[in-house]
Amino acid sequence: MKKELFNLYLEKQEIFKSVVKRFPFDDLAGPFLMSPDPQYEKQKLPFLVVGQETNGWTNHIDAIDKQMSAYEQFHVGKDNPASAFWHTIRRLESILGNDPYSCAWTNLSKFDLYGVRTYGKYEKAIAVADAVIAEEIKILQPKVCMFFTGPYFDTRLKAVFSGLEFLSIPGWNPKQFCLLKHPDLPLFTFRSYHPRSLRLKSLEKDFIQYMSSIDFKVKVES
């Protein structure tokens, strides 16, 4: 898997470089390149988390191996237990019956701008690399996928996954939490607010309760 990802990123390296070259005087951290721990593949329900963008990252644009090493060293938030994002992911790993720190994590935006979300001309430029996520998913073959991208990124997701459907979940506003349906996505694919927003809007408890109510194992194996 690591070799497949390395080859993918090598193939896309010129796209990443073209983004950075457009803004030589701005701090575009990235690209964000995955290198999941081997235990990811050992889980009965391999779990992929898709975020928005990093909050600062390394920027070895010419060294794919170094960018992937940064991912490995971060170890899917092991040293960030107080983060709402990683706290929620640890709970989801437990709900799925997976080992702690066994998920894989990627972001739709492969770069951040000064450690925060891009906008305007920056977002438009960075979006040229959005399609990489579809290829990452093909390599990782997750059984469960959670897009913590919120409604803000829906247009970009539709551009990557043509014909993407947003299916309602009873009791939820689709902007808050919904199912995603597409041939290139696993059966259990969701799109939700960022965990921090779920917490601020007092939706975290209901979100966890709903995820806990699903019998993933039976449905995935049937």
Image: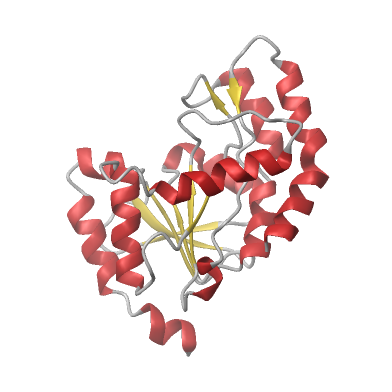
Position in image of residue 133 (x %, y %): 63, 50
As drawn, is 176 to the left or to the right of 165? left
Q: Residue at x 44, y 50 (%)?
A: 76
Residue 70 found in image quarter: top right
Would residue 148 be found to the left or right of residue 109 on screen? left
Is residue 116 positioned above or below 41 on the image? above
Asked whether, in this view, residue 185 is left or right of residue 103, the answer is right
Colouring scheme applied when the structure was drawn: secondary structure
Determine the residue positioned at 74% across, 46% down: 9
Corner quadrant of residue 91: bottom left
Give the vertical position of 128 relative to 217 (above or below).
Answer: above
Q: Residue at x 59, y 17 (%)?
A: 27
Q: Position of residue 179 (x, y in %)?
A: 43, 61
Find residue 149 and report its image quarter.
top left
Horizontal and vertical percent position of residue 112: 54, 28
Front residue of 110 and 215: 110
Q: Nearer the viewer, residue 37 or 182?
A: 37
Direction bottom: furthest residue: 222
Give residue 176's position: percent from left, percent from top: 33, 48
